Amino acid sequence: MDLQPKTALTVLGLETSCDETAAAVVRLGTDGRASVKSSIVASQIAEHAPFGGVVPEIAARAHVELIDAVTRQALDAAGVSLSELDGVAATAGPGLVGGVMVGLSAGKAIALARGLPLVAVNHLEGHAVSARLDQAIDYPFLLLLVSGGHCQLLEVAGVGRCRRLGSTIDDAAGEAFDKIAKTLGLPYPGGPALEKLAEGGDPARYSLPRALLGREGCDFSFSGLKTAAARLAETVADPGQRRDLAAAVQAAIARQLTERSTRAMAAYAERHAGEALRFVVAGGVAANRSVRAALEAAAQAHGFSFNAPALAYCTDNAAMIALAGAERLALGLTDGLDAVARPRWPLDEAAALADPTHLPGRKGAKA
Ligand code: KG4
Ligand code: ZN
């Protein structure tokens, strides 16, 4: 399927599901390609850092304080007035519900005041389309979605058309990065800090468990790695050891992501014989250079093209929400002003209901 709206659509996107207050303007052309007119992200990292993680009440209050100014900034930077918009898209979940409500209510208010259609976007669908913001990637593709709250392999045929091939049975990959980084005494958010510490380290110095290696299916598990790394972190003292342990953790996470993705590639290739095979990685962990490199090599080895969003579109942003909204709008998939904020919202609801043992990763902040 590819998506070509009859007329170009300009959509305002709002994202407030965790600790970034973000607004963006994206235009979806009649050729089905996106152009980002503006993307403003106000990070609350400084406010949450003293607590070592996201504090929901602080996040919700900060979103209330920032959302108007960030929205105005996004419109100004795009040079677009409210009357030039074709729709408003806001994250409606999954996430911290107090924060989600702020962006969704702001989106509803603009939609109501300007008579615009509203699209209530699943944050995960935003990540799923994020590589299409700056690259020409047609549907369908195989997606590895790796963020702070989610770790899933999905077949993506378009907005509203995702099929889950596998997901984590305990922690998400970003959550593993964050928790292990914390045991190493690194500041929040741990993923980027751990990547920095790992630079030049020897990943072979410490051996870590290889969960699910060789096991059937495309599921993930990071809890054993987390426990083993936490134990080792108590024993390391000098900077060289810390660096090598960080490198070993990063390599272990990259290895598992790659091994499970390779299995999904085999299953996907069977279902899509004779078609173009595309592999996309998205979400905050896709910003990690080691992870990207390992996945790219695996994709190439298995006959898949490889795409990852620009770094700014890996972590949370509103451009991806605007694009998911525009693609939905092009298909006539809009929502009423009674759309609700949802703390939990699986992308493939049928798969989630059929197999409820697969937790969506972190409960709370990034869920
Ligand atoms: O997509 P995202 O911004 O928020 C969620 O929707 O979860 O992902 C945030 C996650 C955090 O766990 C963060 O530590 C991780 O992505 N992350 C990284 C890197 N940059 C962000 N993990 C490893 N290496 C990085 N460079
Ligand atoms: Zn996210």
Image (tube, rainbow, N blue to C red):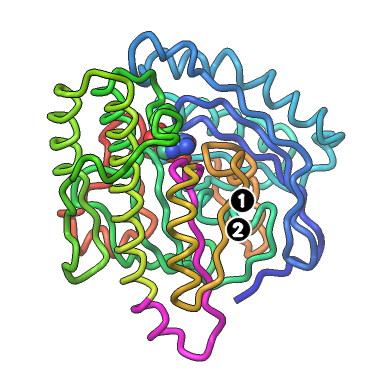
Crowdedness of circle 2 by 10 Å Cα count: few (<14), some, many (20+)? many
Q: Position of residue 107 (x, y in %)?
A: 61, 34
Q: Is residue 339 left or right of residue 205?
A: right
Left or right side of 172 for 41: right
Q: Nearer the viewer, residue 206 or 90?
A: 206
- First to last magenta residue range: 266-287
Residue corresponding to mark 1: 325
Circle 2 — which element? Answer: helix
Type of amino acid under label 1? Gly
Q: Is residue 283 magenta?
A: yes
How many neighbours does mark 1 have within 10 angstroms: few (below 14), some (14-19), or many (20 or more)? Answer: many
x 69%, y 35%: residue: 39
Marks 2 and 1 in Cβ contact (< 8 Å)? yes
Label total for image: 2
For residue 328, the mark is: 2
Q: CA distance from mark 2 to mark 1?
A: 5 Å
